[in-house]
Image (cartoon, grey):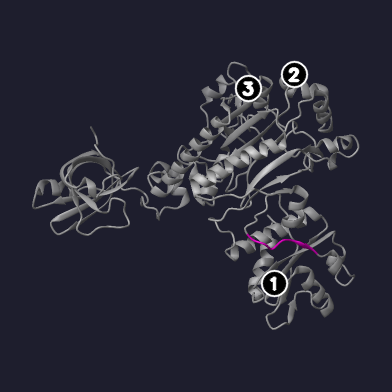
Amino acid sequence: MYRTKTCGELRASDNGSVVTLAGWVQRSRKMGGMTFVDLRDRYGITQLVFNEAVDKELCERANKLGREYCVQVTGKVCERESKNANMPTGDIEVIASELNVLSESLTPPFTIEDNTDGGDDIRMKYRYLDLRRAAVRRNLELRHRMTILIRNFLDSKQFIEVETPILIGSTPEGARDFVVPSRMNPGQFYALPQSPQTLKQLLMVSGFDRYFQIAKCFRDEDLRADRQPEFTQIDCEMSFVDQDDVIDLFEEMARHLFREIRGVELPKLQQMTWHEAMRRFGSDKPDLRFGMEFVELMDVLKTGAFPVFDSAEYIGGICVPGCASYTRKQLDQLTDFVKRPQIGAKGLVYVKYNADGSVKSSIDKFYGPEVFQKLKEKMGASDGDLVLILSGDKPNKARMQLCALRLEMGDRLGLRDKDRFECLWIVDFPLFEWSDEEQRLMSTHHPFTMPNPDDIPLLDEHPERVRAKAYDFVCNGIEVGGGSLRIHDGKLQEKMFGILGFTPEKAMAQFGFLINAFKYGAPPHAGLAFGLDRFVSIMAGLDSIRDCIAFPKNNSGRDVMLDAPGVLDVKQLEELHLKVDLGQE
């Protein structure tokens, strides 16, 4: 046997027993005639002791051990004189009597410690070493535990886990597909699934009633901290349910996860409409851990005194408590922040209601004291507070800019506590959104989303006003999951395709399998998908989903460890009937 115990399980009760351990050398230190080695495996660290007075040759071999050597050690468990309360195994040590080097190691390119000296790029290149760090391993252990809890919960609710294909047909109505050429079908391509959407609907037509899958999904889109080209969904679908049924069940699942993982009892979650969320927070995923709600100021500031406000379609502000002391430099930094291309505001107006009752503003030459007093009342500001104001000719765009500023102030003031959880449901999304790139209406979610029955009469004349029977689960300003009721009526689905610009022929070419399936008694059905990576990152208090994925891509979509994507051999391209300009002479 390579080991009889792991490096994390020995305690004072094991005193006197002979054990064999195996693992990696975390560190070693020589003190007089004694050599101390910390041996690490997945389960913890145990201190080994090599005594020169007992076995000089063994001690000399121990002195040659380098960091990350993989070794096997046999010895006797003894109670330590100087105990280490910071280690679970800190009450004992193992007095080594045998040492077997299983594998030597080069000096690692960074320290295998929680607080490592390795930057992101080097750690991603040597990810197999990074995964030895306890801080990273704990994230994957958390992911494993959450996955088990989810499976058991859904199993208890009569869901059945079904695997759906990875190689499917392309459905361009959404993000960009990753495509795979078919060698056996020259000139034709598979697509990797952005989600199992149509397949899980077919399972409902098949009578499976309740389906789930921990599904791998792929989207060829620009990356951010919470996006990867491949990601994992907790994908679910249910038959004979309405919106409240889905929300109630998955709110129960979320409550179960928070209770088991974080020891947090979620209250009954509020439901906020999309329009209310945009009006109050400028976002369909509002962070409710702090205030600074938007206040619309058209009636106060659109007076003919200041041309910028007079020409605006929206004027809104936030009140930042206790920040009237901000210096000109700090205010200039905020102005530069909102003018960044990612945000796109043209400027920032501030009003400081100083602690002594005086007022200082970037627009005080345009307005008199009575306007600033009215503004103070409208904003609910007190002496010592700072009011920040943005405006624009496109209301929702201006609201999103103000949202970015609100979140920045929340970060600056330390109000976005990772150990506090504020969750809610966003409902009543618009069914369609206008695409400047496509110059047409597109589905806010996907073409199979059920319109709100009250709004179906608007589909012919005012489709832009139709609400969707859709819902998103939001936690701490992050969209963790979302879903919708699905259209199961063929005529209504046909009308949706028409609004989206699909001819009957195009709709049949792309979705004929689903259209035909619905002719055979499709049940009312609905679904939801949680982003597993995002959910785990919230539970772990991470800023990025990368550290809860075993082998993530970088911000350019590259796997720097595998050096992928890469160039194919010309012979492979020929077999796939592809001609690619490789930039070679």
**How many marks are shown on the rendered structure?**
3
Q: Which residue is mark 3?
A: 208
**Residue in the foreground of this view, choosing between 87 and 564:** 87
**Magenta segment: does it hold 91?**
no
Residue 521 image label? 2
Q: Is residue 104 visible?
A: no
SS at mark 1?
Answer: strand
Q: Earlier in the sequence, mark 2 or mark 1?
A: 1
Report the residue at 70% width, 77% height from top.
383
Q: Position of residue 141 (x, y in %)?
A: 44, 42
- At which x and y percent is residue 491? 83, 24
Q: Nearer the viewer, residue 546 or 559?
A: 546
Secondary structure beneath dot 2 equals loop
Q: Earlier in the sequence, mark 2 or mark 3?
A: 3
Q: Is residue 80 above or below residue 382?
A: above
Asked whether 347 or 355 is in front, the reply is 355
Q: Are marks 2 and 1 in contact (CB under 8 Å)?
A: no
Q: Is residue 262 left or right of residue 50?
A: right
In this rendering, which labeled residue sits more in front, label 1 or label 3?
A: 3
Q: Residue at x 80, y 29 (%)?
A: 497
Q: Which residues are magenta?
A: 290-296
